[in-house]
Amino acid sequence: MNTFVNRTGCDLHSHTQASDGMNTPSENVQMAAERGLAALAITDHDTVAGVEEALQAGKRLNITVVPGVEISTMTGGTDIHVLGYYVDYHDSVFLERLAELRRTREQRNTKILQKLRELGIEVTMEEVIEGLGRPLGPDESIGRPHIADVLVLKGHALDLRDAFDRYLAQGAAAYVPQPRIHPTKACEWIREAGGVAVLAHPGLYGNDKLVRTIIEEGAFKGIEVFHSDHGKPEEERYSAMAEEYGLIVTAGSDYHGQRQGQVFHGEIGSRQVPVEVLNQLQQARETIR
């Protein structure tokens, strides 16, 4: 039984060095404990490599760590992110599926670097990995933010946002589309790994009609209503949508750490839901088994 002391809030979206976050899993958990959270989810992109370390830190610091993942998918020409909570992070089938997604990401990175070379910008994968300041660990992945760091370091962009706007965002000069699975497929993978699927930051897609279409396919059990990039109008709109479709309301800072002096997307604990939401997720997980 978890003891929350007087803690009441849960931040259910954070990233670590296992994907494109700046901090170790232990550091994320430490920050969550210092900020009085009851629980923190570790939801790295297409990997669960940071979960075990975070769980151990959670035991030391008396804070619940929710094992999670954020899977990159696509439908209707739009990148959609699917959060998976309470996944079995030892499940061999699930791990291989995530590994395949990371291999696809690696192929995309190679193509991005080639496009940059064609633009007269020389960035090597060795430089990108060197920019981590540490060896790349097993099952960890390189993403566009890592490439952006090198672009800034070499003077080709002012900051992370400028690097994306000029070169890496959809429609930019070195953008390369990545083959992705459908959101419903990601939900199936999460369910088969014993977890529950939640639609991440719907406000970032700029298409509520698409959001409704995805929800109506019936694979999601929750929706991230409160997110660092959601304002009050988005929170109200998606709260209503959650009630309409009977979805669990979740919240997440989407913390990635500090890059070039800026926190991306928000600080740990900046978006929270009460601990009762953990029970709702657990119940939904049991229902779909």
Image: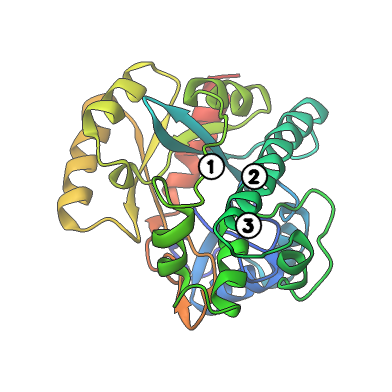
Question: In this view of the protein, which residue sits in the foreground, 5 or 103?
Answer: 103
Q: Where 259 falls versus 163 (above or below)?
A: below
User: What amino acid is at disc 2?
Assistant: Lys
Q: Earlier in the sequence, mark 2 or mark 1?
A: 2
User: Are the two marked residues, 2 and 1, in contact with CB atoms closer than 8 angstroms?
Assistant: yes
Residue beneath label 2, please? 111
Distance from disc 1 to disc 3, alpha carbons, whole Å, reads 14 Å
Callout 2: SS: helix
Q: Give the labeled residue for mark 3.
A: 117
Decide: few, some or many residues near mark 2? Use Cα within 10 Å; few <14, some 14-19, many ≥20. some
Going from the N terminus, do you reach mark 1 or mark 3 first?
A: 3
Q: Which residue is mark 1?
A: 176
Q: Coloring scheme of the render?
A: rainbow
Q: Amino acid at mark 1?
A: Val
Taking the spot 39% from the left edge, 46% from the top edge, the residue there is: 171
- In the rendered view, would you say 103 is above or below 5? above
Q: Residue at x 35, y 61 (%)?
A: 228
- Counting from the top left corner in percent of width and height, residue 259 is at 53, 75
Residue at 18 percent across and 37 percent down: it is 240
Give the left or right position of residue 117, taking residue 224 as reference: right
- Residue 142 image point, x, y percent: 68, 55
